[in-house]
Amino acid sequence: MPLNYAAVERNANKYIDQSLEWQAEARRLARELNGLYEQAAQDSKTLRQAIEQAELTQAALYTAKPSHEPPLASFPLPARPLNFTLLAADGSQIVPNRHRALQFGLINIGIFKVHFGSGQPPMIDLISELLDFDQLFIDGSLISEDEVGLQRDLRERVLIRESITSEDPRPFLTLTDGPLDLFYRSSIKGEAAQDAQRTVWELDQNFEREGILSAGYIDKPGSTMFANMLDLYQKHIQNTPTNEQKKPKLISDSALLKDRLEPGHRSALFEIITKRTPANPHRLRCAFFFLNVANPHGKECLARVEVPWWLAQKRELVDLVHAILYHDAQTLDSHPYPYALHRAHELALVRLTETEELERLLLSKMPPDTPETNHRSNKDHWKGQK
Amino acid sequence: MMENKLSQTHNSQIGFVTGGGLEANLQVRLTVPPQSVQEGAFVVIDSNNWRFYGLVTDLRLTAIDENYANQINAQRFTPQLAELLNQQTLYTNLAVMPVLMMETGPDVDSPEYAAWREEHPNESAPITVKTIPSHHAPVKLADRADIATIFGEENNQNIFRVGNTREQGHPVCLDLDKFVQRSSGIFGTTGSGKSFLARMILAGLINYDRASTLIFDMHNEYGIDTSSSDTGQGVAGLKNKFQSKVQLVGLGADTNIGQQRPDFTLEISHKDITTEDVLQLTEALNLKETTPTTLDALENEFGDNWFTQFMNMRVGAMVENEDGKLEPAPDSVEFWARRAGVHKAAAEGLRSKLTRLFNRPYLKNAPASNGLSDITNALQSGRHVVLSFGNYQSDLDYLLATNLITRKIRDTWEKATNDFHSKKRAEPRPLVVVVEEAHKLLNREMASQTIFSTIARELRKYYVTLLIIDQRPSQIYDEVMSQLGTRISGALGDEDDINAVLSGLPGRGGLRGMLAKLQPKEEVLMLGWGVPMPIPIRSRRYDSQFYKDLLGDEAEAPDMKKSSRMLGF
Amino acid sequence: MSASPKIIPIGKLLRAENSRFVAGCRVKELETPALGSLVKVKLEDQSEIYGLITHILINDDNLVRQLVSGVSIPSEYTADNRYNRNLPVEIHVLTVGYAQNGQIAHRLPPRPPLSLDQLFLCDDADVRQFTSQHGYLRHILRLQDQPIEELLAAHFAQVKPLQTTEWYKTACEKVITLLRDDYAQLTKVLDVLSELETE
C-alpha cells in the first residue's frame, strides 16, 4: 500500500533536525579525535604500548595497532608491473526459505582472472553448488543467512586456490570483497566455524609459501578501529582502567582520515587486533591500510584494504597491492571500484528469476504429488510470489 | 462440322480476359511479349463450355503505375530483378473484338462430357456472339482447327482458300456458295495487288463452277496471259488455264485481244438499245434536260426502231418545196420534231450529241450474229465469259456496253426465274457479273438509274449478283456499298475509302486501323456478311503453284495457238 | 542435427502480441544475433513460434557506459567486454509463422508467447525448411517503424546461401507482388537487393 505520506511528513522535519544535529556532533567529535590522533601519531611508541597492554589484559578487543610505518604517513602510488595476474572472486547465495515450496540452498561463486600485459580476455568461471540436503539443517532448524554465507566464503577461498595454476604469470594477486578473516561473522560458533577458520589459515600459509598475494577490499568502510585505538591510547596515558565501561565515542576511520590522503595515496599499515573468547588458534593475522581510490581531480573516496601480515612486512609486496588495486579501481573512475571485483560480483549474482527457475527445475524432478512440496506458503502466495 | 476435340486448342495461352464487353470490345491482359501478337490476330477464348472467336483490334502498353514505365528498370536494378519487376508491372493490353461464339461443352476427356453430350446431341455451330466470356478466361491464338471450324476446310470446290493467317500461316477459306449469294467487292488502291487478288478469286469461282461469271475485262487483264508491271514475269490468263470453259469475247467485229483472236465477237443491234441506255450516258454525252422528253417521243413513235430511225434523220436538212422555199426535209430532225411536237432545238441538239454513239462500229442495225444471245447462251450453259473492249476504251463505250449487256442478261435471268417459280423450267444457274471501275457505273449520280445498282439492291432475287472491283469505294453509292456481302480489301489510304468499305457493317471501328495498315500486294482484309468473321490474311499468290494446287499437276499451260483455235463452241 | 542448437538465453519477455514480441536478453557482444535472423521460441504445448529479428537494442549498461567514457581501459578489459560479458540487449522479433506437430504454417500463431525460456537461433536446416515456402515474407510488410528494405536485405543475405537460385528468384517475385502497388517502397527494396547482388 502507499505510504501515509501526510503522517510521515509531519515527522520529517523532526528527523531532519535530529540528523543535522548528529552530523554537527560527529564533526565536533572528529575534530577532537583528530587532535588526539595527531598527538598519538607523534608518540607512536606509547601508542603501541597501549595496545599491547590491552591485548594482554582484555578478553575482547577490536582495534588497530600501528605497524613499523608512522601512523600518519601517506604513501604515493607506486608503479605497476607490466605483467601480473589478478584474480577476483565473489559469491552470492540462495538461503533456504521455509515459505518456499521447497527448501534448498545454493552457493554461487564467480571467478574472474586476468593476465595483465597479455591483451587476452580474462578467464571467467562460475561455480554453482547446491547444498546437500543434510547441510540445510543445524540442530533441527534451517540454517541462516550467516551460516550459508560462511559456507560461501569458505568455498570462495578454496576455489581461489584451485584457480591458480603454474602458467599464470607472477606476481599473482587474489582479491575478495570484505575482510580476509572469516571471523567478522560473529554469530558463527561451534565446530563448523572452527573448521572453516582452520582451512582459511592453512590456505594463507600455502599462499605465503608460494608467494601468492591476497587482499580483501572494503568499499565505503565503516570500521571504527582507529577510534578504539585512540580510546585505548587516551586511557593509557590517562591511566584510566581499560575495562571501564565508558563507551568510546565512535567516529569512523574514514572520517578521521578525511583530507589526509591524496588521490592514489595509501595510509600507513596497521595490524588488525581482534580478540575474543574463546581464543582461536587459527586466527589469521592481518594488516590493513586505507587507500584513496579517487581520480586525481575527484572527490575523496576511501577504501580499506586488508592484507595478510606476512605480506605487510614486505614493502615491495605492499606496493604491488597498492598499485594494482588503485589502477583497477580507476578503471571505473566515475565511481571507483575494482573492475575485477565488480565483474566477479556480476558473475556470481543470483537473481530472483534464477532462484525461481532453480526451484522449478528441482520441483520438476520430484515425482508428482509429493505432498510436502507442492505449494508455497500461503503468506507468500498472497504476496504474489509463485 | 468438327467434333468437340476442339476444346483443346493446341496453341498455348497468350493472355486472359480482364474486362470490357460486347460494345466496347474485350480487354485482355497479354502474358507473352507484345511482338508475338499482331493487330488482326484471330484469337479464341474459352469460358464455361463456350468458345469465343475474336479479332485483336488494338494493342496498348500499360503499367500498374506510370513510374515503372517511366524508368528503365534494367539500368537501375540488376538484370534479374529488373526482369522480374517488368514482368509484374509492365503489361500489354489487347482489345479483342468478339464476333462469334460456339458451344463446345466440357473437355472431351472429362467426366461431365458424356452428360453434356446427351443434352446437346446436335453438332454445334458458331453463332454471332451474344454474350461474353468471364473474367480471366484464357485467350489463345486460333489454331488450324479453329480456323477450319469458322471458315471451312479447303476442298478446292466451294471452300476456296484465299490466303493464310498472318501470325501462323493457317489456311483461311471463302465459302463460295455464300460468296455468290450477294453482291461482293474487291477493293484496294492502285498497286495494292487488287488485280492479282481478283484473278485468284475469279479462278476460284470458275473452278467452283456452280455459278457462271461474266467478266467485263476493261483493261485486258483477266482473259489473256499478260505480264506483271512490277516483275515483268508472265501472268497466266483465265482462258489459258480453263480453256473452253472460258469464252473470250471481243467488242466489235475486228477486235483482237492482245495477239489473240476472241472466241467470238459482239456487235449490238440497234434494236437492243433502249432510251434508258442512252439516258445513262447523259453525263458522258453531255445531254440536256430536254433529252428524256425527246427520247420519249422517239420511242412512242418508232418503238424499238427508234435508234435506227433517229440515226437516219439529218440535222438541218432542207429541201425546196413547191413554192421554191426551203423547208425541212422529210428525213430531217426538224421535220420529225414538228410532227412529234418536240422542240426543234432540243431534238437537233440531241441528234448531234448522239452522233458519237451512232458512229460506234459495234452498233449495227443488223449485226452479223446475235452476240448478246451468244453471250447469254454461253452463260446459261455453264460457261464463263470474258468480254474485252478491244479498241473501245472510252468511258462512253464502257458505260454503254456494260449497262446494255447487263440489262439484257438480267432480263433473261428474270424471265428464267419467273419460269422456274411457275415450275416450267429448272432453276436458273446463278450468275456473277464482274465489273471494274465500278465507281463509274455506281456513283451516287448514276446509282438510281443503272442496272447495276438494281442488281446490287435486289440481292439474288433473280440469281444475278455483282462482283465489284474498285480502287475508290468512297465514290460508290453508299447504299450499294452497304448491300455488299463479302468485301475483300487490300491496303487503302484514303479515310473515306476505308469508311466506305466498312459501311453497313455494325460496330467495326476496330477494323479501320487494320485497313490502313495492310501490307500492299501481300495482305487483305476479308469482311462482311459472306465471311463468318472479319479477318486479315496474307493473300494467296496467283502463280503456277496456285494452279497446280487448284487444278492438279496436269493443268500446265497448253499451247497458246491451240487455245486460239477454239472459236465458238 | 549434430551440434546442439544455438541458444540465446533470455532474461525476460518484455512484451508480446500475436504479431511480435520483445525479449530482454544478455548476450556476449560477439554472439549478438544479426538483424534478419530467423529465431524460434518453444511454447509450453511444444508448439514453436518463428520470428525474424527486426531490431536489436543494446540497453544502457552502466559498466559499458563507464568503460566507454573512462580514462584508459586496459586491453584485457576491452577484451573482457567483448568476449565475456553478457550485454543487456533488447531483441525485437517479428512473428512470421509457427509450427505445430512438425507442421509449419506461415500464419500468425493462435497464441503469442506468454513466457520465454529461451530463444533459439534457427540452424541451417531449420532455416531451409521454414523458408522453403515464401508466404512468410508478407509479414515483413507489416513493419511500420522500420525500413523494410534493410530487414529484407539482411534476411536474404542470410538465407540465400542456404537456398537455390530458384528460391531467390521466387522470393524476389513474391516481394515484387506484395509491394508492387507501393512504388516508392518497392524501388527502395529493389535498390537494396541490387546492391546486395552486386557486392
Image: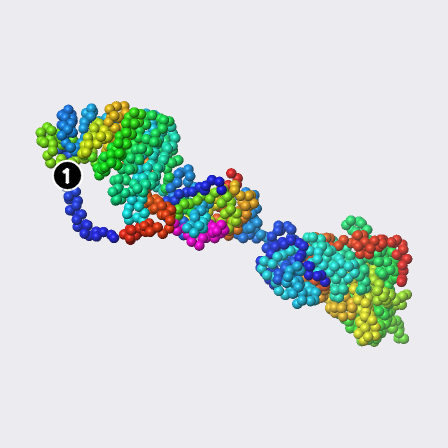
Number of numbered discs visible in the structure rendering: 1
Compare residues A103 and B381 and report the one nearer the observer: A103
Image-quadrant location for residue B18: bottom right
Q: Position of residue A113 (x, y in %)?
A: 35, 32
Picture quarter with the N terminus of chain B = bottom right
Residue highlighted by disc 1: A24
Query: Which amino acid type corresponds to the residue marked 1 in the rendered image?
Result: Ala
Q: Position of residue B94 (x, y in %)?
A: 61, 56
Compare residues B182 and B36 and report the one nearer the observer: B36
Residue C110 falls inside the magenta stretch: yes
Q: Position of residue B348 (x, y in %)?
A: 81, 69
Q: Position of residue B566 (x, y in %)?
A: 89, 59
Picture quarter with the C terminus of chain B = bottom right
| x 29%, y 51%: residue | A377
In the drawing, does residue A233 fall left or right of residue C121? left
Residue numbers of the magenta segment = C94-115
In the drawing, does residue B235 fall left or right of residue C57? right
In the drawing, does residue B99 fall left or right of residue B313? left
Compare residues A269 and C90 and report the one nearer the observer: A269
B201 is higher (above) or lower (below) than C8:
below
Give the structural element (helix, strand or loop) at label 1. helix
Q: Is residue B359 visible?
A: no
Residue A164 falls inside the magenta stretch: no
Compare residues C55 and B217 and report the one nearer the observer: C55
User: Which chain does tag 1 point to?
Assistant: A
B310 is higher (above) or lower (below) than B252:
below
